[in-house]
Amino acid sequence: MGRGSRAAAPLGALPLLLLLLPLLPPSPSRALTPRISLPLGSEKRPFLKFEAENIFNYTALLLSKDGRTVYVGAREALLALNSSVSFLPGGEYQELLWPADAERKQQCSFKGKDPERDCQNYIKILLPLNSSHLIACGTEAFSPACTYIDVENFTLAQDKQGNILLEDGKGRCPFDPNFKSTALVVDGELYTATASSFLGNDPTISRSQSLRPIKSESSLNWLRDPAFMASAHIPESLGSSEGDDDKIYFFFSETGQELEFFENTVVSRIARICKGDEGGGRVLQQRWTSFLKAQLVCLRPDDGFPFNVLQDVFTLTPRPEDWPDTLFYGVFTPQWNGGTMEGSAVCVFTMKDVQSTFSGFFKEVNRETQQWYTVTHPVPSPRPGACITNSARERKINSSLQLPDRVLNFLKDHFLMDGQVRSRMLLQPQAHYQRVTVHRVPTLNRTYDVLFLGTGDGWVHKAVSMGTTMHIIEELQVFPAGQPVRHLLLDADRGLLYAASHSSVVKVPVANCSLYQSCGDCLLARDPYCAWNGSRCASITLYQPEVASRPWIQDIEGGNATNLCGPSKARASVPKGEKPCEQVHFQPHTVNTLACPLLSNLATRLWLHNGAPINTSASCRVLATGDLLLVGSQQELGLFQCWSLEGGIKQLEASYCPKVVDEVTGGAGRSGSVPVIINTSRVSAGNKASWGTDKSYWTEFLVMCALFVFAMVLLILFFLYRHRGGMKVFLKQGECASVHPKTRPVVLPPETRPLNGMSPPNTPLDQGYQALLDSSPGTRIFTESEKRPLSVQDSFVEVSPVCPRPRVRLGSVIRDSVV
Ligand SMILES: *[C@@H]1O[C@H](CO)[C@@H](O)[C@H](O)[C@H]1NC(C)=O
Ligand SMILES: *[C@@H]1O[C@H](CO)[C@@H](O)[C@H](O)[C@H]1NC(C)=O
Ligand SMILES: *[C@@H]1O[C@H](CO)[C@@H](O)[C@H](O)[C@H]1NC(C)=O
Ligand SMILES: *[C@@H]1O[C@H](CO)[C@@H](O)[C@H](O)[C@H]1NC(C)=O
Ligand SMILES: *[C@@H]1O[C@H](CO)[C@@H](O)[C@H](O)[C@H]1NC(C)=O
Ligand SMILES: *[C@@H]1O[C@H](CO)[C@@H](O)[C@H](O)[C@H]1NC(C)=O
Ligand SMILES: *[C@@H]1O[C@H](CO)[C@@H](O)[C@H](O)[C@H]1NC(C)=O
Ligand SMILES: *[C@@H]1O[C@H](CO)[C@@H](O)[C@H](O)[C@H]1NC(C)=O
Ligand SMILES: *[C@@H]1O[C@H](CO)[C@@H](O)[C@H](O)[C@H]1NC(C)=O
Ligand SMILES: *[C@@H]1O[C@H](CO)[C@@H](O)[C@H](O)[C@H]1NC(C)=O
Ligand SMILES: *[C@@H]1O[C@H](CO)[C@@H](O)[C@H](O)[C@H]1NC(C)=O
């Protein structure tokens, strides 16, 4: 014991070293800065908030067809909000309480769940079922149930005896409110993907509300502890020459069973089923006969660092007929931390790539070795997993019920595609994106996809995709810090974005063009919703080419704003009034600041004194905040101007004419024009060091770090040398412990939330995964130290006692190494 602790002491320095690593600056390629930051309460982008008293956890949002009602599913309640009135203070709304049954609550807490947190009814599904009813499913105190809502009068549907129609929600809605699930209604049939047991296992993809209910077969292990994020219906039958069927896609992340080296690797998936699937005749009765899944890959192009945990997917189909142009926008987070604090990534997948992956090779598993191989031998016909097409109908196979047994038996083990669906990474911000919704915005010349991205701490980023590059137009805080954006819903027709969190629902206009006050600003914003009409930055929806006296100007790609606005318009703008210069009064020998707030984070300031750049002197200096620090003295009089420089456009932001006035005479009567007098204590004449706000200590810091590291290494080496005998014994003990079969290793730091839940990004793994893997045969055992990434970039060294040669992970490639 004594030996052990002594030997461990120097290793305590390791976490310190690891702490230092994230300070290295990350590669800035796709980590863009939002151009404008608008924190909560900003007057520039006002929005409306809805909060019902005593109602929390706004989990589901649904917009009525006419866009005038927003249905909200919350904890124990359903709400119908009038989109114009309910968001105003004191605005009316309809409320429909749907509390979990008292008996169920009691059973729930009896089973060891938290009565306050878990044993409530959280609405997880709220969808339009048909013209007269919505369907809603809730967790009902760990005993899920579904019900119908009469849209006409917003009441729960009742049977003839007047009892509320309640159906079992098992297999449609999760038991645990923290679990993610997805659902959609196609032609009045409900497709759901969720965990369907109390413990959160037994994942099921099913179709209900249907005359032909079908589900996935759990004994076949088609799904490995998945977290379902999204689903989509693609009308692939439209215009199909081969008589193909519509398909339903599901997006989720799960344990990557085909990745042999890393048992706990999470992979993101796309799975699909055919809408017309009716199950098999003899084999796979009432089970999907078209279930196939493939891996979705979102890698950083520079170094192949994987963003493998899916958070959300938005399916953008312009018009049903144009389904081949569908884009799937996915938000991913990394399972491992590459050392540089990766936040999240946005990747886009095309329909063409999805289709070619699903028509490619299958994977198959060798039951003995549990290794996965590509199937290169011929597959039965009709192609397993394909929908019923004309060629099948020619062979008298009209539905999946008539599919030959050998096709279905093949499908039972061949549900994983060999190919991966590759993507293009659009953005890799530091922010933790969790939700995404996309709007294809028609502009003057073409359309652009505008992405609204909800973060884990209450912000919404608005970004425009220009094919290969992106630009983050603005970031807007809609919820207090710590409240994740749980849901985003776009009303494209009205130009509104709804966002939901634990405590409220907000309604934000997609843009505020009047925020941009000059032609230069309007163009630099690169906001597809706004264009310069010749005198103002106006919403593009107001543009009528026939009426407009001159063409409106827009420059989304950011090519050449200087050119478009013309020198006069781009430069001559003075934001607050046309007044050439603001009179400010100083007292002699006081220190004053002149403010120069810039709208854009991408702009740089230029202070001019009488038209010449300001030279730093003892009495005049630009602070790190961009404000000008000025000592009131006779020499400093003149005109001070603050210009912003961005994208080749130079704009006057502020202009001051300071005047030194004696205390007795000056200052009075000029409200608003007297600048703030800052602490004089900070200024001592001649002390240049205190002015050094622009100076960076980065180099010094690095040198100190290097010295520190060097000293620590020396110290460690010294200790190792001193205790080399003890170390040997200690290491031997460790080896024995991890090889012993009965010992449960400390696999991971304790993690209370299941993977399926809102696990924060970067959480390596979850209890759920672990539980599943522990019970499955062939699971290898890793210890804590084996899992800890040791290197800065995306390489991971695994030192396993079972395998003395460490493995290094580089991107998705795993190599043995002699590190
Ligand atoms: C838009 O921005 C302007 C300028 O900051 C502000 O005065 C106005 O209230 C905003 N309007 C809306 C509708 O957001
Ligand atoms: C419900 O909201 C509370 C905060 O109001 C939050 O702590 C809790 O995690 C939420 N629960 C779910 C299931 O979203
Ligand atoms: C919303 O409120 C407005 C004003 O009270 C009303 O005219 C409108 O009919 C309401 N809409 C719905 C869908 O109830
Ligand atoms: C909609 O579905 C509900 C519930 O299944 C049913 O009672 C109702 O009759 C349906 N309405 C229409 C118009 O089909
Ligand atoms: C709601 O409207 C439906 C018909 O639209 C009717 O059958 C039902 O009785 C009404 N419910 C209530 C509570 O008024
Ligand atoms: C398939 O459907 C066609 C018409 O839709 C019908 O003529 C044919 O008999 C059906 N075949 C089988 C095997 O059911
Ligand atoms: C729009 O198209 C016209 C002609 O096709 C071109 O001259 C103009 O530069 C384009 N404008 C923008 C903003 O791309
Ligand atoms: C631009 O729009 C504003 C208001 O939207 C309008 O007052 C102005 O006349 C327009 N200017 C031109 C040149 O169309
Ligand atoms: C913008 O256009 C002007 C005139 O056509 C040209 O001189 C300038 O180089 C262009 N700037 C950029 C960044 O393309
Ligand atoms: C600033 O310094 C430069 C060179 O040091 C000098 O040429 C210039 O005249 C100075 N400008 C002012 C406004 O003092
Ligand atoms: C002066 O300094 C104190 C403490 O450092 C600070 O609280 C105060 O806000 C400062 N005042 C101004 C005007 O900056």
Image (cartoon, grey):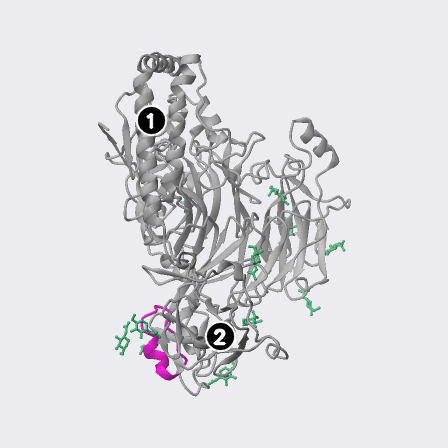
Q: Which mark is residue 196?
A: none
Can residue 129 be seen here?
Answer: no
Mark 2 or 1, nearer chain start: 2
In percent of width and height, residue 756 lies at 51, 37
Can residue 76 be seen here?
Answer: yes
Q: Is residue 277 left or right of residue 416?
A: right
- For the residue pair 370 and 503, the one nearer the viewer reads as 503
Amino acid type for the residue under numbered disc 1: Leu
> Circle 2 is placed at which residue position?
541
In percent of width and height, residue 716 lies at 33, 25
Amino acid type for the residue under numbered disc 2: Thr
Element under disc 1? helix
> What stretch of residues is rendered in magenta?
552-568
Q: Is residue 703 left or right of residue 92?
A: left
Q: Is residue 673 above or below residue 481?
A: below
Residue occupying the point 63% across, 55% down: 71
Q: Which mark is residue 715?
A: 1
Is residue 556 in the magenta section?
yes
- For the residue pair 779 and 766, the one nearer the viewer reads as 766
Element under disc 2? helix
Q: Judge the density around disc 1: few (<14), some (14-19), many (≥20) Cα neighbours within 10 Å.
A: some
Within the image, what quadrant is residue 166 found in? Answer: top right
Is residue 22 in the magenta section?
no
Quadrant including the C terminus: top left
In percent of width and height, residue 164 lies at 73, 44
Question: Hey, which residue is sitting farthest left in the picture?
Answer: 818
